[in-house]
Image (tube, rainbow, N blue to C red):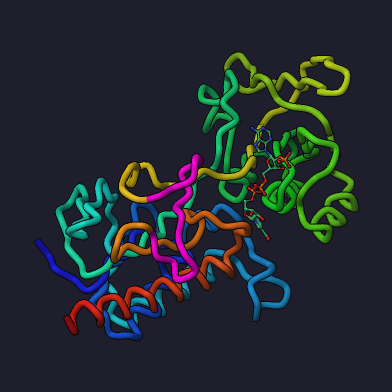
Amino acid sequence: MENLDLIIIGGGPAGLTAALYAGRSRLDTLLMEKMAVGGRILLSETIENYPGFPGGILTQELMARMEKQVKELGVKIVSEQVLDLDCASRIVNAAGGSYQAGAIIIASGARPRKLNVPGEEQYTGRGVSYCATCDAPFFKGKKVVIVGGGNAVAEEAIYLSRFASAVSVIHRRGDLRASPILQERMRQNSKINFILNSIVTQIKGTNSLESVVVKDLLSGKVNDFACDGVFIYIGSEPETLFLKNKLQMDEAGFIVTDENMATTAIGVFACGDCRKKGFYQVINACGDGAVAADSAYKFIANQKGK
Ligand code: NAP
């Protein structure tokens, strides 16, 4: 079994920033990522609120730069899905083998939440999508709906409008929670329209997706709304199932930490979107990652001094 100073689980902005700080602290560090390094932010095309990039930067470019910076410091990155973590021994079991470390940082992020309505699973990849950046070009000149009312919906509705002929935002309340600057841009966009106080109760089609069933929550009326694609942006769920009953989480599975990113398991730290907090942004995921690496460094130094 390979022994390391630090294992970081997850290669999004939080994990990569933790790796950056760990590399600069000369910790022997392994970063494990089950999918593409960069994380869920890659589902968005650009990021406009990361400081230092007026006009925004492509998320792929930002994350590629973070990865390069980390690799230059000698941090090892492996493509492996973590199956299990033994918090007491700090042994990580993955499909490709087991690894042990002096400290662990969990930066496993979050995945898109599902609507859980009939038709969603059946049409996923055939009209239902959770990634406008990936799939918008398939809907050139077509009519799409996008479900949700947060920042992700706002950004992705604007992106989709570059391809689709019409983008209908279906949201369960009368007000969106997206930032005012994004709401202004949506309302100025002639391709975007709003179906508010409404929910999607079914996704229908024959060979391909043809419509969604929309229920107006004020009137109770239900109608079929014709569309070619459904994009779902209704928030996220933490990727923490592999940690169940191993450390304290809230009822939704977000990991509870203190301000130093320490979890309830000694020597195990958590940062970014998998952590319970009030504000989920790339910028504070990076901040979390830096704090977690500093805490892990101090923990390891303390253990070595004993
Ligand atoms: P979010 O901010 O949590 O918003 C989720 C939206 O989906 C809410 O409007 C919510 O409605 C709705 N919703 C939740 N469950 C639903 C359900 N079962 N059926 C129908 N609607 C449902 O999530 P997000 O927009 O995906 O963003 C995730 C996080 O990333 C947020 O913290 C966000 O600020 C951040 N983010 C930031 C940026 C940026 O700053 N540029 C861009 C993208 C994402 P209610 O409003 O009624 O609760």
27 or 201: nearer the eye? 27
Residue occupying image coordinates x 32% and y 85%: 25
Query: Within the image, what quadrant is residue 69 found in?
Result: bottom left
Q: Is residue 300 magenta?
A: no
x then y, percent, for residue 300:
25, 77
Q: Is residue 174 left or right of residue 201?
A: right
x then y, percent, for residue 120:
57, 25
3 or 112: nearer the eye? 3
Count of all numbered marks drawn on residues in the image = 0
x then y, percent, for residue 107:
41, 60
Query: Within the image, what quadrant is residue 180 found in?
Result: bottom right
Residue occupying image coordinates x 83% and y 16%: 220
Taking 214 as reference, is 180 above or below it? below
Taking 119 as reference, is 303 above or below it? below
Q: Which quadrant does the N terminus fall into?
A: bottom left
Taking 278 as reference, is 28 above or below it? below
Q: Is residue 135 left or right of residue 54?
A: left
**Residue pushed farthest front?**
306
Residue occupying image coordinates x 62% and y 46%: 132
Magenta stretch in the rendered image: 248-263
Residue occupying image coordinates x 29% and y 57%: 79
Q: Which quadrant does the C terminus fall into?
A: bottom left
Q: Is residue 209 left or right of residue 121?
A: right
x then y, percent, for residue 40:
51, 54
